[in-house]
Image (spheres, rainbow, N blue to C red):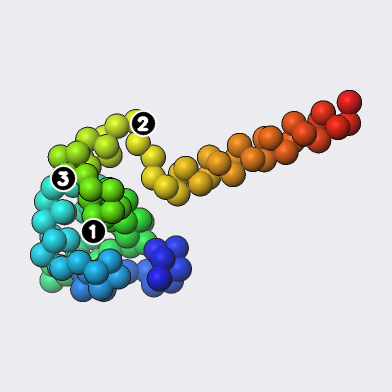
Amino acid sequence: MSVSDIEKKYYTIGEVAALFGVSTSLIRYWEKRFKQLSPQKSGQGIRKYTVSDLEQFKTIFQLIKQQGYTIKGAQEALKSSTYSSPKTHRALIENLKEVKDFFKLLQESV
């Protein structure tokens, strides 16, 4: 299941842990280390993660678990204006393809 397939409004920490295959304690630890992870909390202190929170968690997860960044390295990458997520890369590639196609059509019409 991808994060974009999600339809619920809020997710519990257990659901997030199951979605990414990590422990709830790891999620809590990352919340302390990454200011970008700050889910809403109910009156009883229960974390409520939105789809936006899941996207942010996914980015951190990819940096640390899939790309091998350290926590400090991931923090720096997220602060860096040159860092962009794979989703951003795909969007840029699509835009470049559209521009290329436009120029091809323009050349053919001249």
Q: Point out the image quarter for the N terminus.
A: bottom left
Question: Is residue 35 among what the camera can see?
Answer: no
* Residue at x 36% of width, y 31% of height: 82
Residue 82 is marked as 2
Residue 71 is marked as 3
Residue 66 is marked as none
Tell me the amino acid under the disc marked 2. Answer: Thr
Tell me the amino acid under the disc marked 3. Answer: Ile
Q: CA distance from mark 3 to mark 1?
A: 19 Å
What is the quadrant of residue 25 in the picture?
A: bottom left
Which callout, 3 or 1, points at the residue further toward the start of the chain?
Answer: 1
Quick one: 23 or 42, which is closer to the camera? 23
Where residue 27 sits: x, y (%)?
Answer: 17, 61
* Residue at x 13% of width, y 47% of height: 33
* Residue at x 35% of width, y 56% of height: 55
* Residue 86 relative to residue 79: left or right: right
Tell me the amino acid under the disc marked 1. Answer: Pro
In the image, which is nearer the foreground, mark 3 or mark 1? 3
Q: Residues within 10 Å of mark 1 (few under 14, many from 20)?
A: some
Q: CA distance from mark 1 to mark 2?
A: 25 Å
Where residue 93 sits: x, y (%)?
Answer: 55, 41
Q: Secondary structure at mark 3?
A: helix
Q: Quick one: which residue is furthest to the right in this view? A: 110
Where residue 78 sits: x, y (%)?
Answer: 28, 39
Q: Residues within 10 Å of mark 3 (few under 14, many from 20)?
A: some
Where residue 77 sits: x, y (%)?
Answer: 27, 37
Residue 39 is marked as 1
In the image, which is nearer the foreground, mark 1 or mark 2? 2
Which callout, 1 or 2, points at the residue further toward the start of the chain?
Answer: 1
